[in-house]
Each structure stands twice: as C-alpha cells, then as structure tokens.
Image: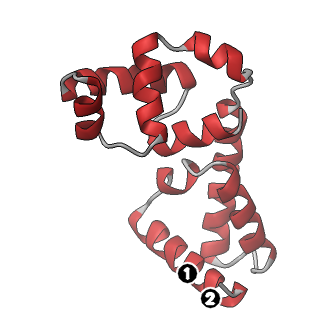
Amino acid sequence: MNEALAEEYFEKALSVGFDEGYIRSFVDELDPMVLLLKLYIEGHNEEDRLAAYAQELLSQTEDAVKHSTFIVSPNTFDKLLTSTELKVFNCILKAYDNTEIAAELGITIRTVKAHTGSIYHKLGVNNRLQCLKKFRNI
C-alpha cells in the first residue's frame, strides 16, 4: 500500500474518532498505534484539530503501553494459567470463537467466557487482540 493512501485512511479514522470521541479504539492498539500517531503528528501542523487529537491519543497510548508491559518467559507463561485456561488460550491462538472453543473443549460458552476473562485479567489485557499481541511479544 502506498504511503499517501495509508495516510488518507488513517486521517479518515482520526476524523471519525475525533467526531465520535473515540479513544480506546486507538489506545488499545498499543505499540503499532504509537508509531502511526508519531508519523502522523510529524507530518502535520500541531494547530490542526486532528494533529492535536493525535497528540492526545499518542500520550494516552504511550501511557497504556507503559502499563501493559508484561515481562515473562514462555516457561513462566505456562505456569501463569491453569491447565484449562491454557487449553482455552491455545484455541484463542487458533482464532477460534467462543462457540468453537466450547465445542472443542466440551464446555459451555459461559465457561469459555469465564476462562477468557480470567486469562485477560492475568495478562492485564482487555480483549483477544491485546491478548494475542502480548503473547507474541513474550
């Protein structure tokens, strides 16, 4: 994808985010968003409303990155989760949805949700995307 087109799409996303008051949609992307926001800010006048919005997002995203760092070796990761949570987590890694996880493990969807919530809590994340990113950074 060329840079001009990518910037156009990113600017549209910022515009929608600004108009609708979105913050988490950007902040939850962590490190990759920091890079995009810095690139956007560098190429725009800081008095521009979207550049100012991008600067605020950058500040909040950098703060989120600092608080999301989870330093653990893969060996201790296995010790962090229960055996059932590890099974659920492995299904998450395979991009299974809750219904598929329930069928694979022979548990209810409610139980899947309980385990995913526990996994997110232990990893300090809020959703599957963050969970996967954290795992890949270990």
Q: Is residue 17 left or right of residue 72?
A: left
Vertical relation: 131 (above or below) 29: above
Question: Residue at coordinates 71% horizontally, 76% vertically from top-left?
Answer: 47
Image coords of residue 106 (percent x, y): 22, 23
What residue lies at 50% left-to-right and 54% top-to-bottom?
23
Q: Are marks 1 and 2 in contact (CB under 8 Å)?
A: yes
Q: Which residue is mark 1?
A: 9
Element type where label 1 sits in the image: helix
Residue 42's image quarter?
bottom right
Instruction: Determine which of the numbered discs, if any, sits on residue 5 in the image.
Output: 2
Q: Residue at x 36, y 43 (%)?
A: 96
Secondary structure, mark 2, is: helix
Q: Is residue 85 left or right of residue 123?
A: left
- Across and down, in percent, residue 55 comes to 69, 61
The residue type indicated by label 1 comes to Tyr
Q: As shown in the figure, which amino acid type bears the numbered disc 2? A: Leu
> Is 131 on the left-hand or right-hand side of 136?
left
Estimate how packed mark 2 is, as few (under 14), some (14 to 19) or many (20 or more) residues with alpha carbons within 10 Å. Answer: few
Q: CA distance from mark 1 to mark 2?
A: 6 Å
Q: Residue furthest right?
A: 42
